[in-house]
Structure formats: C-alpha cells, structure tokens
Image: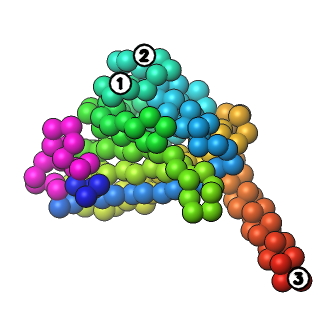
Amino acid sequence: MIIAALLLSDGALFSQHFEDVYRVVENRMTVDASPQYAWEVIADFSGVSEFHALFDESILLKGTKGIIEVGSERESHIPDGIYNVILKERITELLEGSFYSYTVFDWENIGLEGMSVTYGVGVNEFGQTEIYNRTVYCMSSGMMTGLTRGKFERGSKDSLISFKYYIETGDSEKNLKKLRKWYKKKGKENEQKDLIVVNYTSSE
C-alpha cells in the first residue's frame, strides 16, 4: 500500500511503461538521542549539506530556510565521481515529528525516470530511537534499474550513518571512509556491551 501510494504521488511519478521495473530500498538505524532531536536533524531540508557527507551543496529553491513544509523545494548536489549528480526535489508529504517525503522533479548527470524518498523517525520495540529512509526509484531502462540497486542501497545506508554521526556527536564529517569506520566501531562496541550484559545475567 505504501509503495503504491508513492508510485502514484505527485502526478504519476512513474509512467505506466516503467511501473514494472521500479525498485524499493529501505534501511533503518538506531541513534543515541531523543526522537525529537533526531527529527530536528533529519528534517533540516535546506541546511543538510552543512554536515551531511552525501551533499556537496543544498540550495533552497522554494520555501523558508529552517522550516520544512509541503511544497518546499531544494537543489541537491551529490558527489558522484567526476560530475556531481544534481537533483531538484519537492516535499510532497509531511507528518511533523514523524516523516517527510520528497519527489525528484528534475535531474542532471543521472539516467532517472523518477524517484521518491522518505525520511522518518520512530521508536522500536526496545524503546530505542530509530531513523529510517525509503527510496522508490526507476532508472531510464530496466537494466540500469537493476544494475544500480547496489549503489542505491549503499547510498541509503551511508546517508543514515552520516545523520547518525551528526546526531550523536554534533560534528560534521564529510569523509565516507571515516564515517563507515566509525559506524563499524560503534557496532563492535555495542556487541561487546550486549555480551557483558548476557554474561552478567548468566552468572546470576
């Protein structure tokens, strides 16, 4: 139902010809922060390039800086080798404090047919704050849609890692290798904490 809604939003995001080759990439990640603060960070629609590793630049085209609202538009410059991918994006759906979705309505240096992205915040069954993203995309050919899935999956995870880093440290880090290394180290530390808890419980 969610996927169908995304496909139909913003005036038929995908043409009928390409509906059968769209792909969905979704990831989520826990963050050591309140849902309210996590939302403040991920909802910085126009200022995200100031700290996020996947944005060289984010330019507000329509709307008010520092305020996210339906209809807001930005131009995002995404590093991708020699040339930046340039995306023009418009907020199409918003639930304050929970999630927002945007549609890519124009692009350069990428063979898109259409794309919609959602970012959100929630609390899992263990009471931990989670951030998530969901990308529904279609490239200009079915073959390219399949071949680029790994790239979209990696970008989805890197985006969440970059948000997590800023949320938990308050610092900006644009080097993806350093971010991935930090995230891997955090994962090992959490595993060690879980092991200590299990061993302590077992000794009881």
Q: Are marks 1 and 2 in contact (CB under 8 Å)?
A: yes
Q: Secondary structure at mark 3?
A: loop
What is the distance, in whole Å, between disc 3 and disc 1 at their CAs?
Answer: 56 Å
Relative to the observer, which residue lies in front, 125 or 99? 125
Residue 7 covered by magenta stretch? yes
Does the magenta run of residues contain 27?
no
Q: Amino acid at mark 2?
A: Thr
Q: Is residue 33 left or right of residue 72?
A: right
- Which numbered disc covers residue 64? 2
Using the image, determine if residue 41 lies above or below residue 197.
above
Check disc 1 and give the amino acid type.
Ser
Which of the two residues, 95 or 65, is positioned nearer the viewer here? 95
| Depth order, front residue of 87/32 | 32
Amino acid type, residue under disc 3 in the picture: Glu
- Check disc 1 and report the residue beneath it: 72
What residue would you read off at disc 3? 204
